[in-house]
Image: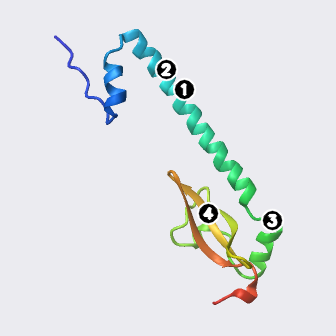
């Protein structure tokens, strides 16, 4: 019984064709390297997300201020906000206008959702 050649994943021709010309031992090496590289890239991505969160998250005092203003700091209280990995940050939309936003990573992009102005006097609510 002869095994059928596997169907390649959706790879660019410039990557797929050179792989198909390699001997089994080289393909084993490529496979190990690709696995290690993927693990490293995932870890690097997580490190970058953690650094961004650490740098951009509001302080404990700012969280307390929001709670004192009656503004929830629980992501489940906001429609469409990720319940895991979301954090509150301050964004300045134009000079002098700062607002609290939920921010989280979704795939390769950042998502955010408005919470409230930093200065209650700027509130339109």
Q: Nearer the viewer, mark 3 or mark 1?
A: 1
Q: Which mark is residue 105?
A: none
Side of 45 relative to 4 (left or right): right
> What residue sits right under mark 3 in the picture?
60
Q: Which callout, 4 or 3, points at the residue further toward the start of the chain?
A: 3
User: What is the count of numbered marks?
Assistant: 4
Q: Residue at x 69, y 55 (%)?
A: 53
- Taking 20 as reference, is 80 above or below it? below
Tag 3–tag 1 contact (CB < 8 Å) = no
- Name above or below for residue 45 compared with residue 55: above
Q: Nearer the viewer, mark 3 or mark 2?
A: 2
In-front residue for pair 75/34? 34
| Placement of the C terminus among the 4 image quadrants | bottom right
Q: Secondary structure at mark 3?
A: helix
Q: Position of residue 20 (x, y in %)?
A: 31, 19
How far apart marks 1 and 4 lie (CA) works out to: 30 Å
- The tag on residue 36 is 1
What residue is shown with label 4? 103
Q: CA distance from mark 2 to mark 1?
A: 6 Å
Write down the quadrant of residue 5 in the picture: top left
Instruction: Please tell me which residue lies in front, 36 or 71.
Output: 36
Residues at badges 3 and 2 in contact (C-beta under 8 Å)?
no
Label 3, label 2: how far apart the Cα atoms are? 44 Å
Image quadrant where one finds the N terminus: top left
Compare residues 77 and 19 and report the one nearer the observer: 19
Q: Which of marks 4 and 1 precedes in the sequence?
A: 1
Q: Tag 1: Cα neighbours inside 10 Å, few (<14), some, or many (≥20)? A: few
The structure residue drawn at horizontal position 36% and vertical position 11%, both measured from the top left corner, is: 24
Horizontal side of residue 86 vs 108, given as left or right: right
Residue 32: give its label: 2
């Amino acid at each position: 019984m002869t095994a059928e050649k596997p169907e390649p994943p959706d790879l660019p021709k410039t990557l797929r064709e050179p792989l198909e010309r390699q001997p089994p031992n080289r393909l084993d090496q490529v496979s190990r390297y690709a696995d290690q590289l993927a693990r490293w890239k995932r870890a690097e991505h997580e490190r970058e997300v953690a650094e961004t969160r650490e740098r951009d998250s509001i302080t404990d005092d700012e969280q307390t201020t929001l709670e004192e203003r009656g503004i929830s700091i629980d992501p489940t209280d906001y429609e469409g906000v990720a319940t895991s990995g979301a954090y509150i940050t301050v964004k300045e939309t134009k000079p002098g206008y700062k607002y609290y936003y939920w921010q989280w990573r979704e795939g390769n992009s950042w998502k955010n959702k408005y919470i409230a102005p930093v200065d209650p006097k700027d509130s339109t609510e």
